[in-house]
Image (cartoon, rainbow, N blue to C red):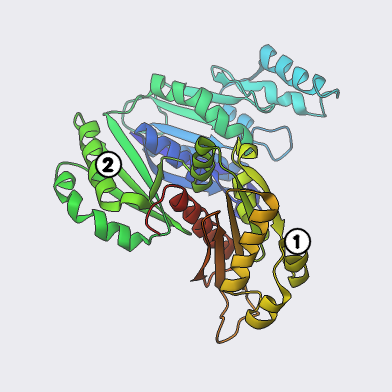
Amino acid sequence: MGIEIINTGSELMIGRVLNTHSQWLCAQLDSLGYTVSRQVTVNDDGTSIVNAVKEALSRSEMVLVTGGLGPTTDDLTRPLIARLFGRRLLTDGSTLERIRGFFAKRGTSVPFHCEIQAQYPEGALIIPNDYGTAPGLLIELEQNPFRSKIGKAVLILLPGPPRELRPMFTERVIPLLREKMPPAENYVSLTLKTACTGESTIERQVAPALEELVRQGLEIGYCARVGEVELRLSAHGSQAQQIVDQAETISRAALGEIIFGTGSDKLEQTVVHLLSERHQTLSTAESCTGGFIAHRITNVPGASEIFMGSCVTYSNKAKINLLGVRPETLNQYGAVSEQTACEMAEGLRRRMNTDYAVSATGIAGPGGGTPEKPVGTVYIGLSTAQKTEARKQVYNYDREAFKTAVSQFALDWIRRTILTLPQ
C-alpha cells in the first residue's frame, strides 16, 4: 500500500524549524509494515496544500497531512480540505467543550479564534487530542476522486507540534490505521543499536554471515549517526519472524559487545539501567563537553538514583578548585592531557564518593589547536575504586557533533566497564 506524507508549514520551508515529522513518522510506519513512497513539505498557502493533497491521492491509498489545524490565519488545512471535497464545515460540540476545558484548567478564557479548532469537514472522524487543542481528522473516501482506479483512500490530518502529534499518532492513529487499512502482508523488523564502531566495519562483520537469509528475503539496512550505527533487519511474508530471529542470532554472534540495545534504545538509558541494577553511582567532570554527558544521563527517567552530580570545569582555575587538579599537572602537561583527565575523574569521584566518575577535556575548535594537539583532540578519563585511566580520541567535527562523539565514547566506556567487556 502506498502512503504519502505532506508536511505543511512555511516555517519549515525557510529553515526556521527543523522538520522532525519526516523521520519520526517514517520510522513509525515502517515498524508497522507500511511503506512510505513519498513525502513532501509545502508552504502555508492554499494552492500548495491543495495541489499536494490532490497529487498524493492520485498515487496513494493513504495520505498523512501534518500542520495547519491551529487557530491562526495561516492554519488553512481544515477549510481547504472541506472545500476540496465539497463538504460543509461543522462544529463538534464535544471538541468545543474540550477546548474550553483545556483553558479553564489553566485559569484563562479561550483565546481569540481558538474555538475554530472545533470545526471539521462533514463526515470526518474526529481524532481527540489529549495534548493540545486542535484535534486530528480522518476522512475516508469510498471512491478516490483523484485516481482512475476504483478504490477507497484514507486522508489523515494531524496537528503540527511534535509534542501533540507523536502521542496522538501512537495512541490514536495507529489503531485506526490497523482498522481502516491493515498492511497487506506480515512484516517484522528489528533494529540493533551499536556504539563507537563504523558503518563499514559493521557491514563487513555481518553481511557475509547473512547472505543466505538475504536470499530468503531478509532486508538489511544501516543507519550511521555520530558514534552510533543502527543495523536494521526486516522481512515480509509468513516466514518473516523466523528469518529476522535467525538474523538477530547471527548478528549478535558477529558483533558481540558492541551491541548496546534494540529499537529506540539510547546509550544513556542502557548505562542508567546497568547502574540501577547494581545500585552503583556515577558523576561527571566535564570541560569541553560543557555538561553534555550529564545532560544525556539526566534525560533518562530514574537517573536520580544513580547520578550524584557534575562539575563543568571549563577553566583551569575551576579544575584546580573544584576537582583538585594539581597546578603543576596543568603547567607541565596542559589542560588537554591524559594526566589532567585522570586527575579530573579521580578528584570528582573522591569528592562525590561515586562508584564511577568520567571526565572530558579537549579542543572543540574551530581554534585552539596545535600541531601536537590538533582541533578535535580530547582526553576522556574514567575513575573507579580499582583504577583511573584516560584515553585519547580525535574527533574533527563541528562543536555539536564533537560533544556528541565524546559523550558517546564516555558512555560506552562506562557500559563496557560495568559489564567487564573488552575495552
Give the answer, above or below, for where 162 lies relative to 108: below
Q: Quadrant of residue 244?
A: top left
Q: Position of residue 223 (x, y in %)?
A: 39, 53
Q: Are marks 1 and 2 in contact (CB under 8 Å)?
A: no
Image coords of residue 314 (percent x, y): 72, 66
Q: Nearer the viewer, residue 236 or 197?
A: 197
The residue located at (32%, 62%) in the rendering is 200
Instruction: Please name the residue shown 44% across and 41% down the image.
Output: 26
**Where residue 340 sits: x, y (%)?**
63, 71
> Is residue 180 visible in this depiction of the protein?
yes
| Quadrant in the rendering for residue 101 | top right
In percent of width and height, residue 203 lies at 28, 58
Give the position of the C terminus as an image quadrant: bottom left
What is the C-alpha distance between the residues marked 1 and 2?
46 Å
Q: Quadrant of the N terminus?
A: top left
Which structural element holds mark 1? helix
Q: Is residue 107 above or below residue 93?
A: below
**Which amino acid type corresponds to the residue marked 2 in the rendered image?**
Glu
Numbered-mark total = 2
Pointer 1: what residue? 322
Q: Would you identify the image quadrant in which residue 68 lies? A: top right
Mark sitting on residue 248? 2
* Label whose residue precedes the other's in the sequence (1 or 2): 2
Locate residue 421 relative to residue 170 in the image: left or right.
left
Instruction: Compare residues 411 and 34 and report the one nearer the observer.
Output: 411
Report the amino acid beneath label 1: Leu
Secondary structure of the residue carrying numbered label 2 = helix
Tell me if I can see residue 291 in this picture: no
* 1 vs 2, front mark: 1
Q: Is residue 381 left or right of residue 26?
A: right
Residues packed near mark 2 inside 10 Å, few (<14), some (14 to 19) or many (20 plus): some
